[in-house]
Image (cartoon, rainbow, N blue to C red):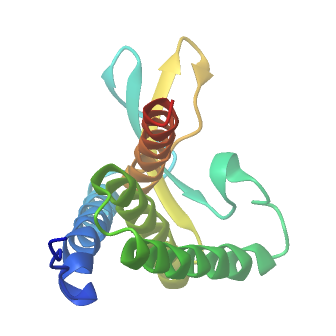
Amino acid sequence: MAKTRSLPASSTLAPWLGIALIVILFDQLTKIAVMKVFAYGTPYALTPFFNMLLVFNRGAAFSFLAAAGGWQRWAFTALGVAAALVIVFLLKRHSGQRLFCTALALIMGGALGNVIDRLAHSYVIDFLDFHVGRWHWPAFNLADSAIVVGAILLVLDELRRVGGSR
């Protein structure tokens, strides 16, 4: 039986940490640009269904717990850091599974992008506002988008895994 050569953990982690870092960088750069260009709360229509709208989210997804007394900042920060630590463990353990690790890297990058906001500003900077008529989806950012795309990739990976085992 031929021996398979495995790469050291640090080198197999590198591409996934690189993806997470790229997500963090793009997320933070877009937030810096939006803060410099757009006024808070003023929608700037780019298409009939999309605005740039600078808002500050002190809660989580869909402003969940935004009106809480401030403890949520630390709770969501701790949750984001804990998620990143678990993801690093999973990336080390499953570094050869490309789709799975890409999904985790996107989720980690998005989570840490929002953690940076919470630590730096006490809120998350959101600015992407999709709408149909007067119905608006809650504003979000690139970090949120990376988390959603990562979650979709996790579902696809699991469907592929389950389908392949039949």
Q: Is residue 39 visible?
A: no
Q: Is residue 133 above or below residue 143?
A: above
Q: Residue at x 52, y 42 (%)?
A: 139
Q: Quadrant of residue 91?
A: bottom left
Q: Is residue 121 above or below residue 49?
A: below
Residue 113's x, y, as percent?
41, 69
Q: Is residue 23 above or below residue 115?
A: above
- Quadrant of image for the N terminus: bottom left
Q: Is residue 139 left or right of residue 47?
A: right
Using the image as rendered, state which of residue 65 and residue 6 is in the foreground.
6
Q: Is residue 157 left or right of residue 137?
A: left
Using the image as rendered, state which of residue 58 and residue 20 is in the foreground.
20
Q: Quadrant of residue 20?
A: bottom left
Residue 66's x, y, as percent?
75, 60
Q: Is residue 17 visible?
A: yes
Residue 153's x, y, as percent?
41, 42
Q: Is residue 10 left or right of residue 63?
A: left
Q: Residue at x 52, y 14 (%)?
A: 132
Question: How many numbered dots are placed on residues in this image?
Answer: 0
Q: Residue at x 39, y 68 (%)?
A: 94
Q: Is residue 152 left or right of residue 38?
A: right
Q: Residue at x 57, y 73 (%)?
A: 83
Q: Residue furthest front?
A: 1
